[in-house]
Amino acid sequence: MAEIVFLVLSVITIGSAIAALEMRSLIYGSIALMGSLGGIAGFFLLLDAPFVALFQLVVYVGAIAVLILFTVMLVKRELIFKKIEDKRRKFAGIGLMLIIMVSIGAVFIDSGIKTITTDEPPVNFRDIGADFVIYYWPALILMGLILAGTVTGALVLARRVDVEVDERTN
Amino acid sequence: MTNELIDFTLVSVALLGIGIYGLAVKRNFIRMLFAIEIIINAANLNLVAFGRFLPHSGGQTLALFSIAIAAAEVAIGLSLIIVAYRMYQNVDIADFRSLKG
């Protein structure tokens, strides 16, 4: 049963990752990206990490993908449907992709990873909470500050200065 | 729990390859951001998979940190896209040459 679920999830994840990059329309591309991120959340569930899976769904599928969709909508209509890529680079890119997949995959298959299996119970999510509060609390605070800083920075970057000046003169 | 670590690792390698292909071939700023997202997700999948098979809670903790930082990165990247689009009326990175200085 788990094998079938794994196969379906990997087809969804990898297929929609390719679709996100190759679809002509950016809007459909971002929806395909959403599917790929959701597939990763399914993998997390399969790995007995429900907390991370829910976090992935909330942050990626809920927030980031919607943010990307709204940004795509701000772009001109003809740019959304135009494919911008180097034709000459396409084959080189596919070759690079295949080289990376085959070489790293061969290294992994050849290494001792294949023999690693586990019968131990999965990590309890209470351990994650203890990790956060006991060991990584400075990193947690720093992460909160970084998030606040980046959101403020994004707002400042995206602000339209010209409109404000016009309004003030009016 | 019948799947093995190698299965998850190979899916992660495939996602990494697709992401690098997107970064190498695409010239659309937004699509390159998609590719970066795919690569980050491959890394997260690896973190959680290795954390499951150790088993140790560190993998999941690090994955949560990584997801949060990726959210910040996307916010900055999208605002940069909006600023560049406003300046050049285009999302083609070949047009952003003057950023070279």
Image (tube, coloured by chain):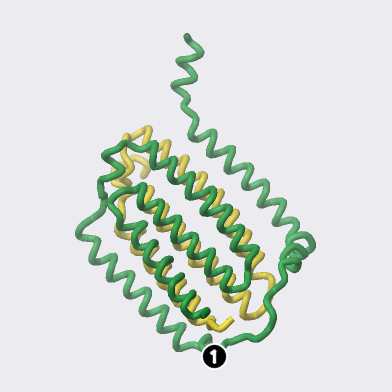
Category of crowding for the residue at label 1, using alpha-carbon neighbours closer than 10 angstroms: few (below 14), some (14–19), many (at least 20): few
Q: Is residue B97 visible?
A: no
Query: Which residue does the image show at 64% across and 67% down from the upper left?
Result: B60
Which amino acid, by three-letter code, is at mark 1?
Thr
Name the secondary structure under disc 1: helix
Q: Where residue B81 sits: x, y (%)?
A: 41, 41
Q: Where residue A130 sits: x, y (%)?
A: 77, 64
Chain painted in green in the figure? A
Query: Which residue does the image show at 43% across and 41% down from the upper left?
Result: A71
Query: Which residue does the image show at 62% across and 74% down from the upper left?
Result: B51
Compared to residue B39, the image places residue B4 above or below, namely below
Chain B shade in the render:
yellow
Query: Which residue does the image show at 69% across and 71% down from the upper left?
Result: B57
Return the residue nearer the eye: B12 or B27.
Answer: B12
Q: Write down the residue under mark 1.
A: A115
Q: Is residue A31 left or right of residue B88?
A: right
Q: Is residue B62 left or right of residue A8?
A: right
Q: Chain of mark 1?
A: A
